[in-house]
Amino acid sequence: MELTVFDTPIGPLGLGEEEGAIVRLYLPGRPLPRLMPHDTPLLAEGRRQLLEYFAGARRAFDLPLDPRGTPFQLRCWQALREIPYGTVSTYGRQALRVGCPRGFRAVGMANHSNPIPILIPCHRVVGADGRLTGFASGLAHKQALLELEGVEVRGGRVRV
């Protein structure tokens, strides 16, 4: 895997590439693999697009992604990619979208395993009551990402 590490408003991110596709995004506070950072054209483009996103100049990403997981996880991650910028969904709605109506906990676990957060926007999923729950690098980062996208967060909740 090729890896680049760069600073963002929420802290340093690590972006990983294999075989011409983005396969990992390491959030702040998460362990990075013991690899010597090495930029490639794809990683440079990924960094550029992420920095544009953090600057408020990008709402969608145009990068080849190759998340690796089970068929259920892949369905969940695809459903995440369908949540529009600046909106939120709930675990229950995502469970319906992937054909597992009572599987909101399984969806939550799949989202927790998302290897490419932000690019696959698991931060846009909240509890049924609008409460911010479960984000790999903490709820403060989840809130910051939602607020960057224009979602109003009050008292750790959003309107759903």
Image (spheres, helix red, strand yellow):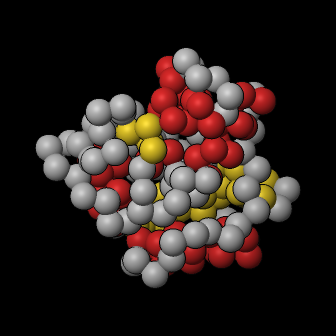
Query: In this rendering, would 94 be left or right of 79?
Result: left
Is 14 rendered above or below residue 72?
below
Can you tell which quarter of the image residue 119 is in?
Answer: bottom right
Can you tell which quarter of the image residue 12 is in?
Answer: bottom left
Q: Residue furthest bottom?
A: 57
**Residue 114: percent from the left, percent from the top?**
59, 39
Residue 113 appears in view: no
**Residue 48: percent from the left, percent from the top?**
56, 77
Q: Residue furthest right?
A: 19
- Name the residue nearer the viewer: 158 or 64: 158
Is 8 rendered above or below residue 136?
below
Q: Residue furthest left?
A: 155
- Name the residue nearer the viewer: 134 or 23: 134
**Residue 137: percent from the left, percent from the top?**
38, 42
> Which image quadrant: the C terminus?
top left
Q: Residue at x 36, y 33 (%)?
A: 127
Q: Residue at x 29, y 33 (%)?
A: 129
Is 107 rendered above or below residue 58?
above
Query: In this rendering, would 23 be left or right of 4?
Result: right
- Name the residue nearer the viewer: 6 or 157: 157
Q: Residue at x 58, y 46 (%)?
A: 80
Can you tell which quarter of the image residue 79 is in?
Answer: top right
Q: Residue at x 65, y 75 (%)?
A: 45
Residue 88 appears in view: yes
- Name the residue nearer the viewer: 30 or 144: 144
Count of numbered tags? 0
